[in-house]
Image (spheres, rainbow, N blue to C red):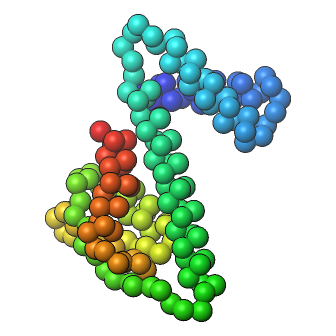
Amino acid sequence: MKNKFLSNILLTFVWVALTGDFSFENYLFGFFLNFHILWLITIGRNRSKYFLIVPKVLLLLVFFLYELIKANIEVAYEVITPKLNMTPGIIMVPLDVKSDIGITVLANMISLTPGTLSLDVSNDKKVLFVHAMYITDKEKFIRGIKDGFERRILEVLS
């Protein structure tokens, strides 16, 4: 998997050098172009796990950006309105993700989203304590984290 990723990065740099356009968009286009070229080359052979993980990572990042924008709008609305609509609280979120890297990624994504903050992980790594600004329904909040961030992180790490 590392070899495919390194080949993709190297071919991206070759693409950028050949086109002479060093913009971010050209790097992105070169990465996706070379990803598809590498994918086409491996048709009929054993496909690397790389070709399954990259789309899942991209979907995780798109979902994170969506949640980030949505939370920013909620917090900005709270700031500009005169009445406070917050219902803050601390929730215990049971964890299905077991690896340290998975827990770290989940906790960081939660903390980077405005209005939520990961506080602690239990010693047995089965519960994540999260502080949130808006908790109207505890079960809905937990389901949102488990069906959102945690499920996608588990897909990437599997």
Residue 117 as seen in the image, left or right of residue 137: right
The x, y position of residue 111, in whole percent, is 44, 68
Q: Is residue 105 visible?
A: yes
Residue drawn 69% across and 35% down? 27
Rendered location of residue 53, percent (x, y): 42, 34
Percent of width and height locating residue 4: 49, 24
Asked which quadrant contains residue 86, the reply is bottom left
For the N terminus, give its image quadrant. top left
Rendering coords of residue 16 (x, y %): 74, 29
Determine the residue positioned at 60% across, 87% down: 81
- The one of 149 and 30 positioned closer to us in this rendering: 149
In the orientation shown, which residue stands out farthest toward the right? 20
Question: In this rendering, would 63 be left or right of 158?
Answer: right
User: In the rendered image, which quarter contains the C terminus?
Assistant: top left
Res 17 quadrant in image: top right
Q: Nearer the viewer, residue 1 or 157?
A: 157
Q: Residue at x 50, y 60 (%)?
A: 67
When asked about the image quadrant of residue 19, the answer is top right
- The residue positioned 22% from the left and 54% from the top of the image is 96
Task: Farthest residue to the left: give it.
Answer: 124
